[in-house]
Amino acid sequence: MRSWAGVAVPELPGRGGRVEVFDTVTQRLRPVGPEHGEARLYACGITPYDATHLGHAFTYVSVDLLVRAWLDAGLGVRYAQNVTDVDDPLLERAEATGDDWRRLATEQIQLYRSDLTALRVVPPAELTGVVDSIELVVALIERLRHEGRVYQLSGDDYPDWYFAIPDPAPLLRGLGIDQQQAQEIFAERGGDPARPGKRGPFDCLVWRAERPGEPAWNSSLGRGRPGWHVECTAIALDRLGPAFDVQAGGSDLAFPHHPMCAAEATALSGEPFATAFLHTGMVGLDGAKMSKSLGNLVFVSQLLADGRDPMAVRLVLLAQHYRRDWEYNSHLLAQAEWRLAHWREACARPSGPAAAPVLAQVREALRTDLDAPSALAVIDQWASAALAGEGTDDAAPALVADLTDALLGVAL
Ligand code: 5CA
Ligand code: ZN
């Protein structure tokens, strides 16, 4: 399905260096993307209800820093993103509000598109809905079946299909949790470790047999619908191929979603799935993670409807390092608005201190684990100096505006 509107990215003099990000599995800063050619990125997309809250926006703006750093390094970017447009939480919400799940999804996807457009996030080529990918997912499950890696539940229960995980240890690499904790997290995040009939607690659902009143599709696995993880496995492999560069999402996807996707892909081909996993911190409000289930959400669309500048909203998000958990409050928005005004005023001046060192420092901050807060501090310093009347470089204001737009996505 259609992505959101493209964003013009200004050309900058020279090139940025090789990008490094902190990889969850190896717990190390690693170069990501090739030295030349095309970087391949999969960002897990939204489940389309309660879009777009600031937690979503933080994750996609953080990923956007990676896309922009790759573009600045002269790479092409092949960027795929799914939409989980049929899934339990979406169906439950539609049921609770008496809405049609398809209508709810369509409306929320549109809201997401307009929010990310306003935030100047560089879009993926397309959004890939699960509903449009049923055949792809079934084909992948059939290949896993051929390899003897999936099985069907038998007995009195629904004949769902599971991917077998005989040894969960490789899935927990880098996460710092033991198997007991992992089972608890698995149960909290859509898994069913204790379901009778499963061969192992971590086996994950790949095809859910039809239940009364739920959407279902005919397939060689019976009528039903896909399980969550295998959707992203199938879509990512189809759009990007194996051993792509980065799979990204919030830290709530670090387990079980991403390792499950990787285990399914590796079971097929023996090849790795993503070579690095990037996870963003969780945004909270009033002492808890911002989440649909808790209802403590601040929506991008609400801030914009209140007349807030989308670039100020973007600056709120950029002021936090992407790996940190943090809490939103209106004071942060006021600070961002002040910063935006300060930068705009400085860039409107006829001259300022030389911009080349600003460009070099901002590039260095961003290529080193996407350190946006340090990049903001560099621009703050330049802006203060320019406003104090320092410097006589009359090309500097335009170059600072361009680099702020190209690398940080903030149009002044
Ligand atoms: N559809 C799945 C991924 S396949 C999903 O997690 N959807 S979501 O709508 O719940 O979240 C979309 C993205 O936003 C995910 O990367 C998720 O990790 C991230 N996210 C959700 N809540 C927060 C939050 N409070 N803070 C930061 N990121 C968040
Ligand atoms: Zn996903």
Image (cartoon, helix red, strand yellow):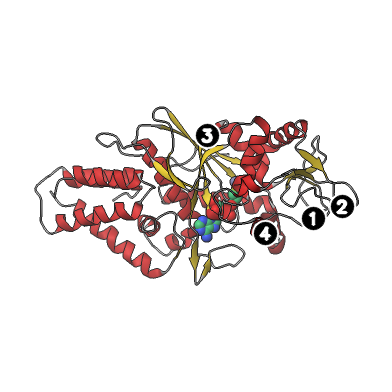
Between 340 and 279, the one lying in front of the other is: 279
Tell which tag, 2 or 1, sits nearer the viewer. Answer: 1
Q: Position of residue 235 (x, y in %)?
A: 61, 37
Numbered circles on residues, count: 4
Is 156 drawn above or below residue 331 in the view shown?
above
Between 138 and 20, the one lying in front of the other is: 20
Which residue does the numbered mark 1 point to in the structure image?
Answer: 195
Helix, strand or loop status at disc 2: loop
Tell which tag, 4 or 1, sits nearer the viewer. Answer: 4
Which residue does the numbered mark 2 point to in the structure image?
Answer: 157
Helix, strand or loop status at disc 4: helix
Is 58 drawn above or below residue 159 in the view shown?
below
Tell which tag, 2 or 4, sits nearer the viewer. Answer: 4
Helix, strand or loop status at disc 3: strand
Amino acid found under the numbered disc labelled 1:
Arg
Question: Is residue 130 visible from the viewing direction of this image?
Answer: no
Between 147 and 56, the one lying in front of the other is: 147
Q: Earlier in the sequence, mark 2 or mark 3?
A: 2
* Badge 4: residue crowd in 10 Å (few <14, some 14–19, many ≥20): few
Which residue does the numbered mark 4 point to in the structure image?
Answer: 180
Q: Looking at mark 4, is its residue's CB closer than 8 Å to ligand 1?
A: no
Q: What is the CA distance from the residue labelled 2 to the residue labelled 1?
A: 10 Å
Which residue does the numbered mark 3 point to in the structure image?
Answer: 244
* Badge 3: residue crowd in 10 Å (few <14, some 14–19, many ≥20): many
Q: Position of residue 188 (x, y in %)?
A: 66, 60
Q: Are marks 2 and 1 in contact (CB under 8 Å)?
A: yes
Q: What is the CA distance from the residue labelled 1 to the residue labelled 3?
A: 33 Å
